[in-house]
Image (spheres, rainbow, N blue to C red):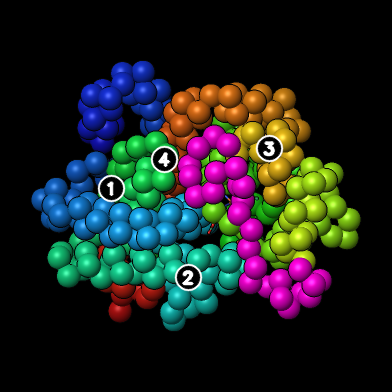
Amino acid sequence: MATSALCFYLLIMSSAVCFSLSAAQNGNIPQGLALDFYQNTCPQARDIIKAEVLKVVTQNPSQAAGLMRIVFHDCFVQGCDASLLLTKPMVSEQIATPNNASLRQSTIRILDNIKDQLEAACPGVVSCADTTVLSSAIALELVGGPNIPVLMGRRDSQTAASNQTVIANIPAPQLSISGLKQNFQNHGLDSRDLVALSGAHTFGQAHCRVVDLQLTPTVSSDLNAGFAANLARICQPNNSAQNRGGLTVHLNFLSTDVFDNSYYKNVLNKVAIFHSDAELLNAPDTKQLVQLYAGDQATFFQQFKLSFTKMVQLGVLTGQNGVIRTKCSVPNS
Ligand code: HEM
């Protein structure tokens, strides 16, 4: 049912996309998700989310990156259930080691604000999980990315994951290509998903304490020497660890805050920041995809749509499972 609704929508745009999306999702669309899920219960939900995302992304386009990373870190750890947004009364995933307090609090406040508006319009109807995923998809398109039709109907979890679970699920930037592939495979995602979703490093920022992993004790051979010197200038102004704490650098100096395929050009030119980015060149299949996407944005966008769609359907709670949290930061009482 959800497949046919989605296919009908996509047929209007492109029959080729419709075919490949259905194939990718065969048997994988979780029961209970639909494009028009809130049509009867909260028809204004999409407009409310869209208006607020438009406002914040117009003011600060880099919030699109903040939203994308929150979706990734939520979906990869016990599914897209907005557990990442919980801060009370349990220990929050936000301070788990891989998140390292590096998720943008300003982005989390944006989601809390959108959710408050949704609660005012339709109390107890729209989940924090759907709010997060749809906000990210809308923001992505606003900064130049593809239009991705997002199925709705996710419900929220009442509990957050432990530090150990977050560590086990979020890939570390020091991973080798086989470690990265294994991590994605554990989530039912393949090498194409790994390369396409890594393309999200085409926008946003990294904290200097993470960048330092590539600069000290010696400069990594992943990096072009001139680029590494620039990073060091920004991240190590007076070599004081204390000063470095809050500093950030753009992940992509070519086109900051725009979603495009320049990430792949950066990887090929050794000006992508993380070791995990450079590792994509260390297996023939992923290297070939990096080369393909560097020269063909349309193909990258087509794969990103498929891979994002798979990611935002990981481990979703639907039907009688989970709840609709009233506040994204706290479980319902
Ligand atoms: C493939 C394995 C991945 C690794 C090892 C990785 C690692 C990282 C690290 C270390 C940061 C910097 C965090 C900080 O210092 O603040 C970062 C930022 C970011 N990552 Fe990834 N990431 C991966 C995959 C992904 C995926 C799949 C997505 C989304 C589809 C994504 C989206 C982002 C975004 C948008 C940012 C910038 C966030 C912001 O500006 O607030 N990453 N990533």
- In the picture, the disc for residue 144 is 4
Spatial CA span between label 4 and label 1? 23 Å
Q: Determine the image quadrant of residue 28.
A: top left
The residue segment tinted magenta is 237-262
Nearest to viewer (mark 1 / mark 2): 2
Q: Which residue is mark 2?
A: 105
Asked which quadrant contains residue 97, the reply is bottom right
Examine the rendered structure and indicate whether residue 171 appears above or below residue 88: above
Residue type at mark 3 is Val
Q: Quadrant of the N terminus?
A: top left
Q: Position of residue 307 (x, y in %)?
A: 47, 36
Which callout, 3 or 4, points to the residue nearer the camera? 4
- Element on which disc 2 rests: helix
- 85 up-or-down from 292: above or below: below
Closer to the N terminus: mark 1 or mark 3?
A: 1
**Residue at horizontal 42 percent and vertical 59 percent from the top:** 60
Q: Which disc number belongs to residue 267?
A: 3
Amino acid residing under circle 2? Gln
In the rendering, at what x and y percent does residue 292 appear?
60, 23
Is the CB of mark 1 within 8 Å of ligand 1?
Answer: no
On whether residue 68 falls in the magenta region, the answer is no
Q: Which mark is residue 152?
A: 1
